[in-house]
Structure formats: structure tokens, C-alpha cells
Amino acid sequence: MSVITVFNGLFSEAGLVVKRVLDSTGCRLVTDQEIVADAAGLSGMAEDKIARAFQAKASVFNSFSHEKERAIAWLRLAMADKLLGRDELLFNGFASQLPDPGIDHILKVCLISGMKERLASAENSEGFAEKHALKLIRKDDEDRAAWVECVRGSKDPWDRSLYDLIVPVGTSGVDKAADLIVEQFSNPAVKVTDVSRAKVEDFALAARVETVLAAEGHSIKVAAKAGAVTLTINKHVLLLERLERELKEIVSGVEGVKKVETGVGKGFHQTDIYRKVDFEVPSKVLLVDDEREFAETLSERLMMRDMGSAVVYDGEAALDLMREDEPEVMVLDLKMPGIDGIEVLRRVKAEHPNIEVIILTGHGSEKDREVCMGLGAFAYLHKPVDIELLSSTLKAANEKIRNAE
């Protein structure tokens, strides 16, 4: 059945418009929360990790973990499953940008207002002061712009070419905005046809292939048409032919795939190097040490072993990053200015007990070791540390995390 997707700016009265459209059309509302929950059920990933894909700020570990790309792949598959159904649906939120824009029976709507109207709406509906509302709007616009660029390739989230209908709610009013959408929804151009239904099936196959590749550690652009799948490599690869053979072997086994072609995109010749995720090694390691040169050198040595790592130089920064990004493994020094390593360990285990912490110190005592292990540290190592010992300890911590998932 026909579908409406609604993307909107914050404080553009989208909720009121959507409610009126639902009342008039009988469509069922599908929220971002429902798509995220479905994607989590399909993938086994945590809902909060999938929802993080909507945020502009990517994880500092993402170049190794590909967590955002994996989340988007599963979000697409969850969206495809909805579109393959027979219900008339209205998608409102970030997920509205996921479907293939070529699916003709989807009415693509954007609801937006001028900044003056948005600030007035924030004050009237929520009681927000202008300064606070402006901060919220700018953050939301930043997230939406980054999301649209990621999934649609446009730097402007309000680009007219992305939508069938852009409604300036602030000037048109809620009722007229809803009437415009309802009127266009009855247009024969957005009715389901055999051609548009086939495009949904193509979108679903591409999404399914994308998740299969993601499960094997690959992040590749996928397109499909009548069973023919095209894989586009957009990062530089040293052994391109070998990668193409591997990708074809994986994708050829996916149900519904009749033919596989590979090629390189416009990003292939850039300096960014294609990395396949190796799930046997940790991709989200946080190094916490006030000895900057040591920490940076250690990070480089871990990355040479395909372990994704980030570095902070004090305990407070480590706790801040943990709350924003949640690393999987932390390599923690004990003696640091400000919050020391033992206090960081205590707070990490209290707030995020699933994070494994490896103590790496040059000044610890036997008593310190007993305290750290009692607080839940995974291991207690001394500087200077043999890189192979640290690597094997990190892999063991990673294995414990994977077995717990």
C-alpha cells in the first residue's frame, strides 16, 4: 500500500500535522523507536547503539568498528520489512530518509518552519527560553544534516530534490499543511504499481546483502535490481581483486541474488584506507595515560595490529568519553593528576560494568593490584609492557565481551 515519509525540523509543529494526516488517511504511524527496536531484534545489536547512528557525532572508534555503518544496514533492513507489508504507513523521523528514493508509491514530505516561527513554537509549546531553544534547534539540525548526508549524499537536509512536498508549516499553518499532504497522498502518482513494488523488493534485497556483508566485517555500498547486485567500493584498497573476489563469494550465497558485480566509486582514490572489521580483536580500546608520547605510540602499535584505539590523558576525560561513546576495553594507568586510575576504575565498573579494564602501570604495588582486581579489573600489567602480552590480553578481554553478548 502507499506510504508517507515525513522528515521535519525541530519545533516545526510536525507532531500536530502528522496527527491530522493520520486521522484523515488511516495510515499507521511508524516511529524511529519502532524501526530501531526492529533493527535491534534482527541484528542482536543493542538499541542504544543503533539509535546512535542518528547522531552527527560519530564514535571515535568508528573507523575500526564500523558500528554506525552496521547500524544503518540493519535499519534499512527493518525499513524494508515494513515496506514489504500491505499496510498504509506513515514514517516520521530520521528513518524516513532510509528508503530508496526511486520507490514511486512513497510520498516524501518535509515539514519545516523559519527560525522565528520555530523559536516561537518552542516557547509556546515547551516554555523554552529563546537561548535554550536555539541551542536545541542547532544541535538537532546538525544531527539531521549529518544523517541526510550519510544516507542520501546531500549536505542540505532541506534540499527540495529530496522531497515530493516541502511544507512551510510556520506560514501555512497546521491544518493547511495536513490538507496538502492528504491531497497529494490521494494522487494516482503515489499509488502502488508492479514497478514500484519491484523497487521495494530491490531495496529489500540490497538491505539484506548489506547486513550479510556487515556481519562479515565489510562496509560496502549496495544496489540491487531484479536480482542483480552491484557492490561499490568507496575507499582505497591495496589488493582490490582479492577483496572483490571475497565480496562476490559472500554475496553470491544470499537468497535472491542472481548476479554480482563490483566496482569502485568516486571515493576510491582518496587517502582513506578500506578496513574490514576483524571481530576477533577489539575495535574500541580507550587508552588512559598522562604520558602522552607513551600513549600515542602505544595507540599506533595497536592500530598496526588492526585494533581501533583512542587516547585521553586524564581520568576526567576518560569518564566523559565513556559516557558519550562507551569503549569496550579500557587500558588504564593508575598514577595520574586529578582523578587517579583506581577511582576511574571504580566509577567505570559502577556505571558500565560491561567495559573491561586492563590496568597498565609503572608505579603500582601489590596492594594496588589487589584493590584493582577486587574492583573488577580484567588484568593488571606493568610497564614497560610487551606488546604481544598486551595484545593477547586485549583479545582475551574482547572474547569475554563477545561471549557475553
Image (cartoon, rainbow, N blue to C red):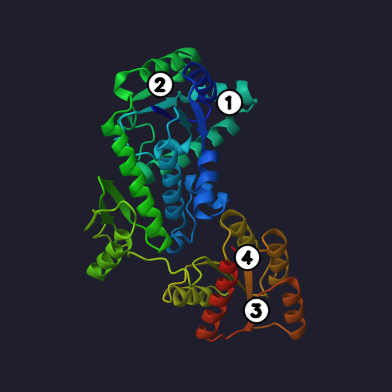
The alpha-carbon separation of the residues under discs 1 and 2 comes to: 19 Å
Can you identify the residue that label 2 sits on?
A: 167
Place of residue 273 in the rendered image (x, y in percent of width and height, measured from the top left): 32, 65
Q: In the rendered view, tell whether residue 189 sits above or below residue 348.
A: above
Q: Position of residue 383 (x, y in %)?
A: 60, 84
Q: CA distance from mark 1 to mark 3?
A: 50 Å
Residue 143: x and y, percent?
Answer: 47, 42
- Residue depicted at x 23% and y 60%: 269
- As drawn, the label of residue 355 is 4
Q: Quadrant of the C terminus?
A: bottom right
Q: For this view, does 397 lie left or right of residue 174?
A: right
How far apart, in angstroms, are the residues tagged by discs 2 and 3? 58 Å
Amino acid under label 4?
A: Ile
The 10 Å Cα crowd at callout 2, few under 14, some 14 to 19, many 20 or more, is many
The residues bearing labels 3 and 4 have C-alpha atoms spaced at a distance of 13 Å
For mark 4, does the 10 Å Cα neighbourhood hold few (<14), some (14 to 19), or many (20 or more) residues?
Answer: many
- Which label was assigned to residue 379? 3
